[in-house]
Image (tube, coloured by chain):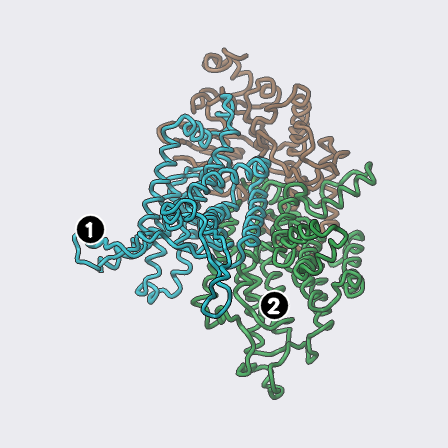
Amino acid sequence: MTMPNVVLHVADVHKRFGGLHALADIDLQVEEGQTHAIIGPNGAGKSTLLNVIIGKLAPSSGQVVFDGTVLTGRKPYQINQLGIARVFQTPEIFADLSVLHNVMIPALAKRDGAFKLNMLRSLEHEHAVREEAEHMLHDVGMHSAREDHAGSLSRGDKRRMELAMCLIQHPRLLLLDEPTAGMSRHDTNTTIELLKKIKSRGMTKVIIEHDMHVVFSLADKISVLAQGRIIADGTPDQVRGNPKVQEAYLGGTA
Amino acid sequence: MFEAIFLQFLNGLDKGSAYALIALGLTLVFGTLGVVNFAHGALFMLGAFCAVLFRQLMTMETITIDPTKLSPWGAPLEVRAPLVQAWFGDFGAVLVNYSVPFSIILTIPVMLLVGIAFERGIIKHFYKRPHAEQILVTFGLAIVAQEIIKSIFGPNPIPQPMPEAARGAADIGIWLGMQANVITYPIWRLVYFLFAGVIIGGVFAFLQFTTFGMVVRAGMADRETVGLLGINIDRRFTIMFGLASVVAGLAGVMYTPLLPPNYHMGMDFLVLSFVVVVVGGMGSLPGAVAAGFLLGILQSFASMTQVKAIVPGIDQVIIYLVAVIILLVRPRGLMGRRGVMEA
Amino acid sequence: MLAMPRKDLILFLGFAAAVLAMPIWLQPFGAAYPDLLNRFAIFAIFAVGFNILFGLTGYLSFGHAAFFGVGSYAAVWSFKLLSMDAVPALLFAVIISGLFALAIGFLSLRRSGIYFSILTLAFAQMSYNLAYSVFTPITNGETGLQLSLNDKRYLDRMFFEAGAGLPSPTLFGVTLSGYVAFYFCAFFLIATFFIAQRVTGSPFGMMLKGIKSNQTRMNYTGVNTRPYTLAAFVISGMYAGLAGALLAITDPLAGAERMQWTASGEVVLMTILGGAGTLVGPVIGAWLIKYFENIFSAINDGILSQFWGFLPEGAQHTAVLISSKFVGEGWFLTLGLVFVLIVVFLPGGVMEGVRRIASMIRPNKPTPASADSSATKPHPAE
């Protein structure tokens, strides 16, 4: 039974690698406009779950439904065209291109679809796309770096730019895979600020994270994953108070 | 019919042996150093020219003019005295007769030096650079090597006689209890096949049973971890490249009686050997050897008149066709590990 | 729709002027004669087209000579069957090589990285071997495809009688030889440069650069990369076919050796030498290689001993002996050495050299990131 305001429904997903049961009986409902965090200790299956959602891995059984459309079996670019954008653990950017072009490419992909043979038009004359990209860079505070070589940015700036690349597509669902992994305290804080800022846009987000500080300051709802199973589900306060969670996870780290 | 098929099978063995040996070296380099070596065919060619050089040294002569005698057409008679025979007598004659196998003595140090010079001079700078650039630089090296050979030995093939004892054919049919002259097979091809077997066995034994080999195999599986153990992997890889060069060179030396060496033979074999490596599975040594023999034999069957009557031109394209099908259907090749350069 | 940014327009006009004036400014270099100028134009077209694939998407094809050869064969067949006019020959060649590229690209682009290179190599070698064997009725095998007195030329026969002797290629009745042929080729070089410039500066071109830079991100950005790379592959195959046809127009015969993988290697060399990913680089690379091929091949021992004349006799002899290995027949040795040095020290080719020198002169000018990326970039999806 799917609620009308459920955007993403991971339905009874199992994933086995050989004899290893990486994901067991995962049932997850992400509601429209919410920030839903998935936490768990290392090896709990967080990344596997994300890869199943995004279509990189096929589940052994069960399926993932996005807004009434089954995602399972679709290619990453098709999933993106449905309105799902993804931020990677290590920023995946176009290191050879300028920051502005990095943000213009997703805008063009959003406008033109998966393929368009528009090779006689000049990019210089794409004023609307360019303005939108500049605007987006302004929003993430990177407008002054728009002509820089993306490969030469700091890790935090790469992350901000990658977020801009996702946001310019106005996705209905944004997936974030450990958005602050490997960052300095300063970069982590600016990233959290940025994520809080975009939270007000009403976009649905799924965050995979193990940094508690990030999770509790952002999430509306938290699912706790341990050994491939969801052991708790609820608001941050509910999860914090759940003895099972404390035993499995928070007891050791928090 | 059985005899005809068996004969084609045998005919495929010598070419298959050459493919297997070249592919083996190519895979050693790719698997250990992670380098796509387009110069590997050139190493095969350099080996073949070691045989040419050795024979030229062995057949050096002193030419003296004997003024007391005249040749049949009236010019002063030139007396040619082979130096080697003059110095070593009968053993010299044996040296000349067996110049191809004896040139292995020259080939091993030369190829080892060439390999180490390549690796230290150029290739080590390309470990971390993209495959496209590795292809480009080794392609350039291959051109340089073949052009140097061309400028020294000229553009024409230089036939290398095989030892007298190995001329003619062995009647394999008799060994297998068949009638005489049903299946005969040139002796030197048999020699080449056995030689390839010894080399391949030697390389595998070396990798399997020596500490050096174990480290290299570990490095092939996971280079970073082995580096973390504090083992100087780079030096071992230099030696590995030298070893691969020697294997390619030996394959070239012994092949000379079957194919008169010319400067572009390396390129001709290289393209095929790459195809062999891909079919066997990039980075898989047993795969390279198996695919080498398999494709050699397939090619031999494809050149049968009966087969060509059904599919004209199949003998020209069979290897490429197999490679294309393998790449499209099973990109990791016959025995390749999952994830090695798969895309 | 066809309006160009000012910067591009200046580059284009400058390029067109330089090409048209080649018979003048190449005079002091001794290269201003039609036969060589034709080759400059033809191989520049080949390299510009190759760069649309390799320079923009990073896919290194080792089989582009196949399309060049197919273009030549198609043009000669058009001469034999239809007409000596160049227009049907070019159309026929571009269409056939485009279809051929579509088929090979469709299969090869299912893989990337070195697998793609080997697939293209395998296809090209197959074409080469078949051209020498089974396809002899079409290719005339080792002799090469030539015009003959028995050719039908149906289109021409509808309008006029066959003359005596072998006819020459024409353009609307004007014989394409000498400088007429050069300006004919030059027109196509300028036109194809213009198209390449448009493609590079278009949203489509930006997508290709994105594919070269990071294919994973491209997929998660909602772009289906395969039709993009296939389009680039087909375009560059058509460029190769056009170049092959032009070569057949300036000299109406076609041989299988044009399809050999060393010929594919040559266009790779041109592109790298000039600077992959840049617009002008491949053109410069093609010109340099064809120019020095011409110069170096012509040098003989007599010229060398004159050149080393200032040395004492013994040293002169040695100098001549050593340098003779690098010229004449040995030209490929020089080419190979230069190529290795370029890949090792200057992977961006001549254009990167120019940029480095320019930034030494004006050290404060920041280099724009979106400018031409050199060949040092990682291959997609590795």
Crowding at dot 1, Cα within 10 Å, few <14 / some 14-19 / many 20+, comes out as few
> What number of labels is visible?
2
Residue B283 position within the rendered picture, expressed as x and y whole percent measured from the top left? 44, 39
Q: Which chain is brown?
A: A
Q: Looking at the picture, tell me which residue is in the foreground, A185 or C23.
A: C23
Residue depth check, mark 1 versus mark 2: number of the one nearer the observer: 1
Q: Chain of mark 1?
A: B
Q: Indicate the colour of chain B.
A: cyan
Say which quarter of the image contains residue C358: top right
User: Type of residue at label 1?
Assistant: Trp
Q: Is residue C131 above or below residue C157?
A: above
Residue A177: x, y in percent? 56, 29
- Looking at the image, the residue that sits furthest to the front is B68
Instruction: Look at the image and give the colour of chain C.
Output: green
- The amino acid beneath tag 2 is Ala
What residue is pinned by disc 2? C245
Question: In this orientation, which residue lies closer to the viewer: B60 or B314?
Answer: B60
Which residue is denoted by mark 1 in the rendering? Answer: B175
- Using the image, determine if residue B264 lies above or below residue B246: below
* Quadrant of the image containing the N terminus of chain B: bottom left
Q: Secondary structure at mark 1?
A: helix
